[in-house]
Amino acid sequence: YLQGTVDVKEFFALENIGKNLAVTLGARYDNYDDIGSTVNPRAGIVYGVSEKLYFKMLYGEAFRAPSFLDLHTKDNGAVEGNPDLDSEKITTLEGMAGYNFTENVRTTLTVYNNRATDIIKGVSTPQGGQHFDNVGSIDATGIEFELRAAFDKNRYGYLNFTFLNSENTTGETVTWMDPV
């Protein structure tokens, strides 16, 4: 794993771009004997217009490697692993605007999109058993609003509204396992 953050305003000695502008870049490399290797990048930009108003953009990729059971289960034909499975992958994109009304009262509005592909699922076989396969993808788009108030060091309250639209983009029923 490698990650670095640059305070752009300080690094380039910029005077008139607001309170701060920072860029974070990172990447993670994983190598598995049975499924191969993957590189997953991450990036973020944070821009503080003032002490009160700020914006954030994030991008990232991640994966879930198939488990040993997903790959190698042998249960007398009832459940069979699949050594040819691909890792599940997810790509995320998020944008946020935040405003601090006071030191103790702040709000954020976040918009995001997540796309998961190569979902691993147990699927039925013609013989009545199941095997694992990469079957689908899911798109999830949402918006979230939060208002938070701190009353003292240990007491706070917040109000949160979230709207999420999650869509299976392949037409498959994507659950962990079909009923046998």
Image: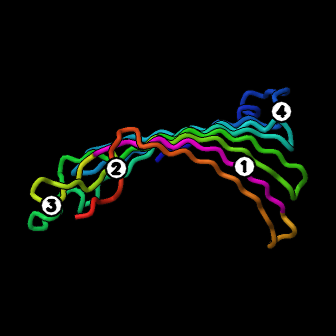
Q: Position of residue 42 (x, y in %)?
A: 52, 40
Which one is closest to the eye, mark 4 or mark 1? 1
Magenta region includes residue 143: yes
Q: What's the distance in space between the residues labelled 4 and 2, CA to CA?
A: 48 Å
**Is disc 2 placed on a helix, strand or loop?**
loop
Q: What's the distance in space between the residues labelled 3 and 2, CA to CA?
A: 17 Å
Q: What's the distance in space between the residues labelled 3 and 1, CA to CA?
A: 45 Å
Give the labeled residue for mark 1: 145
Q: Position of residue 1 (x, y in %)?
A: 46, 48
Tell me where the magenta segment starts and ends, as one range.
135-149
**Amino acid at pointer 4:** Gly
Which one is closest to the eye, mark 3 or mark 1? 3
Give me the residue at 65% from left, 44% from top.
Answer: 143
Q: What's the distance in space between the residues labelled 1 and 2, CA to CA?
A: 30 Å
Label disc, if present, on residue 18 of the rendered structure? 4
Quadrant placement of the C terminus: bottom left
**Amino acid at pointer 3:** Gly
Say which quarter of the image contains residue 48.
top right
Give me the residue at 21% from left, 51% from top.
Answer: 34
Which one is earlier in the sequence, the residue at label 1 or at label 2? 1
Give me the residue at 60% from left, 40% from top.
Answer: 94
Which one is closest to the eye, mark 1 or mark 2? 2
Give me the residue at 47% from left, 39% from top.
Answer: 41
Q: Is residue 73 visible?
A: yes
Is the stretch drawn in magenta largely helix, strand or loop?
strand
**Is disc 4 placed on a helix, strand or loop?**
loop
Between 14 and 45, the residue placed more toward the observer is 45
**Alpha-carbon neighbours of circle 3 within 10 Å: few (<14), some, or many (≥20)?**
some
Say which quarter of the image contains residue 72.
bottom left
Label disc, if present, on residue 129 of the rendered structure? 3
